Amino acid sequence: MAHDLVEIENNKLRLHLHPGQTAAWDADQRFVFVLAGTQSGKTSFGPWWLEREIRRCGDGDYLAVTATYDLFKLKMLPEMLTVFGGYHPGWEYHKTDRVIHNGDKRIILRAATSEGGLESATAKAAWIDECGQDDFGIGAWEAVLRRLSLEQGRILGTTTIYNLGWLYTEVYKRWTAGDPDYFIKQFESIMNPEFPKEEFERARRTLPAWKFEMQYRGNFSRPAGMIYDVFDTEKHVIAPFTIPDWWARYGGMDYGGVNTAAVCYAEDPETKVLYAIKEYLAGGKTAREHAEALKQWGCRLWVGGAPSEDQWRLEFQQAGLPVRGPEIKEVEVGIDRVYGCHKRDEIYVFDTLSRYLDEKGRYSRKLDDSGQPTEEIKDKNSFHVMDAERYIVGFIRGGYTELPETQPTIQSKWVDDDISGESRWKRY
């Protein structure tokens, strides 16, 4: 919606919304999402929706969140100030605090890349823009939900589609399954009457089909460069079920002071199929604190960390959780083993593993100037759960051997149990 489509008639504002915007405006669900083509009138629509929520809900705090600080400066802030302080006087912008306020009403402006800034407010409603970008992670989405939980506030999400991450698994899939809390409106760039049809047709002719669908039509598609392109959410994501006590459990771990991640697999002893049943991602804790939480999973084997991260493994072992180093050093070999399991339908994932599914849908390779995948993994250091999976699946699906003498695990050993015949860790 362009600003010149806002009309003032008899001292009253009149919004000339196109059909896509009108559908989102009229939706009364708690979570409303506009997934649409570029330049289709998403960002300019958001402030008007938020202004109406403020009139409905009254004094208090509200959120306006976009993917990055650059997008905040270049797109969100100008649109917000056009509405709040422009068409609706009385609002003031405080640059230092990044808030717009009017008496006891306050809009907190934030970027998703600074999740900590989302944790300090109890809000009544939120507008999240460009929430489909890689930089708008599931952690930011969950933080916004927490800020709105007390008031059960509404959310408007506006974005072009970029990947198959949390927006697909946590929002789109819920909507298609009939969740009454969700409403999605998808429309093409040319729904905006000011978008040139010639440009739309040029994009159709010249862009890869997946990119045109996502960026100009607002439809999900499988983008080029996805590492696990054989992972099928329709087939491989399942509802949780009770895991029998006699099934073996295996844990993979990725270390970090800010983010320590883990994933747990249960193995069907007859089919050898693996089920991803638990996930873990936490920071600001000691190795002992992490270990105490992960011991509850009952894994018979833990594998984690890069080959050089012996000190981390030693810390966990001293906390009572022995962790083996990976058998393979090459990242691509580990990826190939996980890929093969997906292709052979040997891994199924509980639909409660939101971070796993978010990372799986975004894990991709960088594209070159011609749009072809390169060998380089995009944002490699941010996929902690994928690394944890690679360590454990690469290990148990490649065969494992006795521990090398050089590994700092002298207080435990992988041995065969005399009674059950199964392998286990034995401390001595």
Image: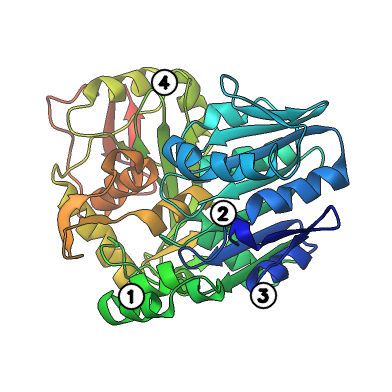
Q: Is residue 417 above or below residue 22?
A: above
Q: How many other residues sit within 10 Å of disc 1, few (<14), some (14-19) or many (≥20)?
A: some
Where residue 90 is drawn, which disc sits there? none
What residue is shown at x 45% (from left), y 69% (from top)? 236
Per the image, label 2 sits on a secondary structure element best described as loop
What residue is shown at x 53% (from left), y 61% (from top)? 169
Q: Are marks 1 and 4 in contact (CB under 8 Å)?
A: no
Image position, residue 21 (x, y; %): 66, 67
Per the image, label 1 sits on a secondary structure element best described as helix
Per the image, label 4 sits on a secondary structure element best described as helix
What residue is shown at x 70% (from left), y 63% (from top)? 182
Name the mark nearer the viewer: 3 or 4.
Answer: 3
Where residue 287 is drawn, which disc sits there? 4
Image position, residue 320 (x, y; %): 42, 23
> Residue tagged by mark 2?
43
Can residue 237 be seen at all in this image of the molecule? yes
Looking at the picture, which amino acid does disc 4 mark?
A: Ala
> Residue tagged by mark 3?
19
